[in-house]
Amino acid sequence: MAKEIKFATAGFRGTIAETVNAQNIYRIALGIAEHIFTDEYYGFEGAGYQKHIKELGLKFKKPLVLVGHDTRFLSDKFADIVCDALVSRGISVKRALYPLPTPAAEWAVLKDGAVGAVIITASEADYTQNGLKWVSYYGGIANNEVVKDIEDKIPSVSSLPKDLPEFGYQNSAVNGHNVRDEYLAHLAKLINVKAIKKAKLKVGVDPLFGTAYAYFKKFLTSNGVEIEGINGGEDVLFGGKVPNAGPESLADLSRLVVKKKLHVGIACNSDCDKFGLIGPDGQWISPNQIAPVLLEHIIKNRKAKGRICRSLITTHLIDEVAKAHNMPVRETPVGFKYINELMITGQYIFGAEESGGIAISNHMPDKDGILACLLVLEMMAVEGKSLKQIFKDFYKKYNAYYDKKVSIPKRELEINQILEKLNLNPPLSLNKTSVWRIDQTDGFKFILRNGNWLALRPSGTEHLIRIYAEAKDPATASKLIVEAQKIIESLS
């Protein structure tokens, strides 16, 4: 059993029955409760939260927390334990009636003025994993400051009471909460459903046995979309696949779209913070391909005006779209929490990361896979065009960019040594082109004089070095990847 509990980029995560067990989930919940009552900014009596609920015109006698879970093995039981722990500390708890997507929980936190939400999920990890996310009052995954405070307040095993609640017991003081229907009603106001109803779209839906199923089905069928669904039942093994909405996991959806001659296929990872798309030809469409096109739609058709933000390994084509509309772009380190911090300011209309996260203004500040999929349908409906035609028209206005990425397994010691050697002696030329600038915000990003770039960074969750390249032709992107692999091996 782990003596210390540490949160990664998007919360606590580990193997079920090892790191993620009833006792550790209970300990984390107690740490969250202590954070709620003692943190001077993010806590119940903290300056930030009190200012927030005052602006909402709300007032609470005691803290309110929303609790939900995804469809993983034991997620519902772990949610029971969280509810018991929080109620035992005098916290009001609303528990979601249905499996809860993380973005729906974040939106509900903002709507209800809750001090936060706990979601039992391991997002897109495989079936052996589970975990816990804490959403703070601002409607986003806990930032570094919040995470450190919670970690510091998690009690040791020896300090736990001897009479722990029975595993899976649900406290009668917990109130049920229909987040799903409220969230879908909000989306119906945010999305142009009138246009979608007229478009008579035929859409393939693959929730990957996750939380998206009940959300997509109800929203789309009620708005005139003909759907063909797969993988919508209950399967804690996720059909033997990793529920990450990538090309391999969406092979079934690809075949369905082609077989049924559908307009598009949409999917989300298990907790819906990321999305996946399949074009009418059965090809997977990467987030880097769709994000600039969606930005153009948001500016052109939704008349949005403001700033744009993206992570440093997200396509620079977003910058080209923003430049065409005289809008500034802010680059952030990898991790949507940094985009979240900018979206909270209200100055940004669009935030994107290459791994499948998109946020827009007038919603909530974190990434939302459900929303991203619906925006694609809205774009097709408003334009009155197929996805293929939309891309064709887009590339008449903008130059195409091609991206590629790979991961190389390395031990932690090796990763640190490689990064140190790169810092001392970085390459000044790549693919026979001089390096114009080196960005060390998060690893190393080598920006070449011709606008192509190569990035190397350690994974925040695994012992991997991730390599990313973007170029104005696919062959160059591949060559940059190969060169980066050679550099890493030479430094190992």
Image: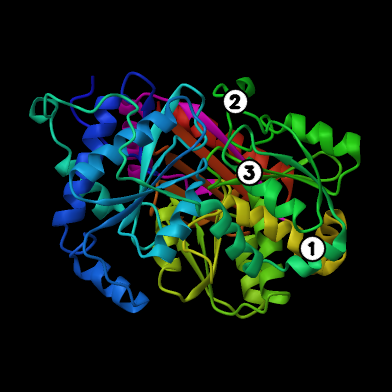
Q: Nearer the viewer, residue 27 or 454?
A: 27
Q: Nearer the viewer, residue 105 or 96?
A: 96
C-alpha span from label 3 to label 2: 16 Å
Tell which circle, 3 or 1, labels the residue nearer the N-terminal end.
1
Quadrant in which the C terminus appears: top left
- The disc at residue 442 is none
Task: Identify the residue position indicated by label 1 in the image.
Answer: 196
Q: Position of residue 101 (x, y in %)?
A: 52, 46
Q: Nearer the viewer, mark 3 or mark 2?
A: 3
Q: Name the image quarter holding residue 139.
A: bottom left
At a point 64% along the width and 41% down the height, the residue shown is 213
| Structure colour scheme | rainbow
Q: Position of residue 195 (x, y in %)?
A: 80, 68
Disc 2 + disc 1, Cβ < 8 Å? no
Label 2: how many Cα within 10 Å (few below 14, some 14–19, many 20+): many
C-alpha span from label 3 to label 1: 19 Å
Question: The disc labelled 1 sits on which kind of residue?
Answer: Ile
Q: Position of residue 62 (x, y in %)?
A: 22, 60
Task: Decide whether residue 408 is among the magenta residues.
Answer: yes
Q: Name the image quarter holding residue 316.
A: bottom right
What is the span of residues highlighted in magenta in the rendered image? Answer: 401-429
Using the rendered image of the protein, determine whether residue 399 is visible from the camera's viewpoint. no
Task: Decide whether residue 139 is among the magenta residues.
Answer: no
Question: The disc labelled 2 sits on which kind of residue?
Answer: Phe
Task: Identify the residue position indicated by label 3 in the image.
Answer: 214
Task: Identify the residue position indicated by label 2 in the image.
Answer: 238
- Say above or below: 490 vs 367: above
* SS assignment at label 3: helix
